[in-house]
Image (spheres, helix red, strand yellow):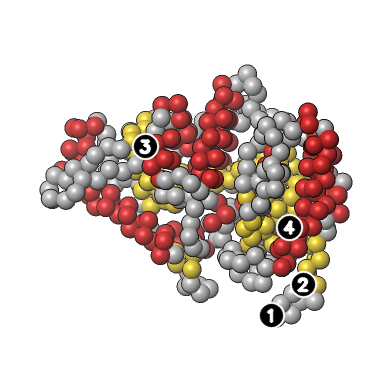
Amino acid sequence: MKGQQPYTNINSFYIEILNKIAELYWVPLDRFLRENPHLIKTFPAFLLEQEQVVFYLGKTHLAVEYYGNETTENLPEDKVVALTYYDFTASENYFFEDVVGFKYESTAAMPGLFLPMPPLAEDLVFPTNRGLDKLIELKWNFDAQNAILGFNSPPFEIPEGQFTRIVNGRFYDADESGLKTRHIKWMDFLPLQIVNETETDHAFKISLTQLVELPINDAHYQYPLPPKSDYKYSKLPQINRFLELIGSGKHSETDLTGFLEKPENKFILTMGFLATEIHSQLLCEWQSDEKDSIKPDFFVVKPNGYADIVEFKLPSLKTNTVVGKINRETFSAEIHSYIAQTRVYQTYFEDPKNREWIKEKYGLTVRYPRRILVVGRRWHFSSMEWREIMDDHRDLEIMTYDDLTDGVVSQFYM
């Protein structure tokens, strides 16, 4: 198994692991909760009511990440597990960097040094140096929530042979487009060994022993949420409704944007894009050409007074996001079509007459706006190649729905 692309067909290797985790962990956890129903409303619901389970295969561990709501009223019945998996066994990076998607560089440590991840890591806040600079610029309050903070940190390494669990970990990076947030709600690193390795194949031995001991403990665990006295706590149900919309697969793009433009839900956009104002569905007429008017989904006004454009596409994707041979990767035709649809916005605002008209009509200052395309889920973009491909696209950012909601929820803890 080589490469970093998700497999399109679930093979027997992953099916066997999935079934074994169900036998040793999910089934006993479900059974104990049904015997103790008072715990159902407080245990981490995504452990059984999974929206998605993602496997990351490394040289020394298999990481299992859970997506879904933190709480539930009832246990699911006969739920099918949606699984995505990535193979990083050929990567030369630290496994944790592949999983989180950020490269950590420290000026306080010697090159090649790393930070061992503890067996249980709760409420981590670890920005890269770039992420820290951006958080400071945004005046984030690091004292607002109990957390284990790390600054100028070398990369984490998961110690070989050690079962490791990350709960409510928040990791930050930044680039010219702004802050990047990676929120890990719950991730278990299961020790593994590569055996019988050849040039074309290898076998794995994965330790699931620790999972056998955890169902009762995890049934009693209460996932860390903002205090109920905090006004932000009241926003969590609206975040959950949005997550349910994007996870159902039954809603259109207009359903999603219609939800976000409601006054009670606009906080998702203002917090997600660090904006001061949100304007939706503004008709933009051409002033120098006879063309059909355009209507971007949203204009988000940044603190500097300039507006960027946000366009939403469906959270489900029909194909892999990155295609092509090694060192010749490119976005899929599906992603390229979405990018092409946003180019008209770039063309429109290159004309100063159009910019002046928007200023007079709506009071918006828009000059060479950044086009932000919200599409897909994080597990569609877990390979590193797509970030390199993005460098070839000027004034364009691709954000997943999970990037958006993580950026909002992480502020609830700050």
- Tell me if 325 is positioned left or right of 337 in this view: right
Q: Secondary structure at mark 2?
A: strand
The circle drawn on residue 203 is: 2
Amino acid on which the number 3 mark rests in the picture: Val
Earlier-in-chain disc, 2 versus 4: 4
Whether residues under marks 2 and 4 lie with C-beta atoms below 8 angstroms apart, the answer is no
Whether residues under marks 3 and 2 lie with C-beta atoms below 8 angstroms apart, the answer is no
Q: Is residue 85 visible?
A: yes
| Foreground pick, 180 / 69 | 69
The circle drawn on residue 236 is: none
Can you say whether 345 is above or below 245 in the image?
Answer: below
Earlier-in-chain disc, 3 versus 4: 4
Mark pair 3, 2: CA separation: 50 Å
Please provide percent x and percent y for residue 238: 53, 31
Give the residue pinned by disc 1: 200
Dot 1 surroundings within 10 Å: few (below 14), some, or many (20 or more)?
Answer: few
Residue at 71 percent across and 77 percent down: it is 201
Residue at 58 percent across and 45 percent down: it is 182
The circle drawn on residue 18 is: 4
Residue at 77 percent across and 35 percent down: it is 221
Amino acid on which the number 1 mark rests in the picture: Thr
Q: Nearer the viewer, mark 3 or mark 4?
A: 4
Residue projecting furthest to the bottom: 199
Mark pair 1, 3: CA separation: 50 Å
Give the residue pinned by disc 3: 300
Earlier-in-chain disc, 1 versus 3: 1
Q: Quadrant of residue 412?
A: top right
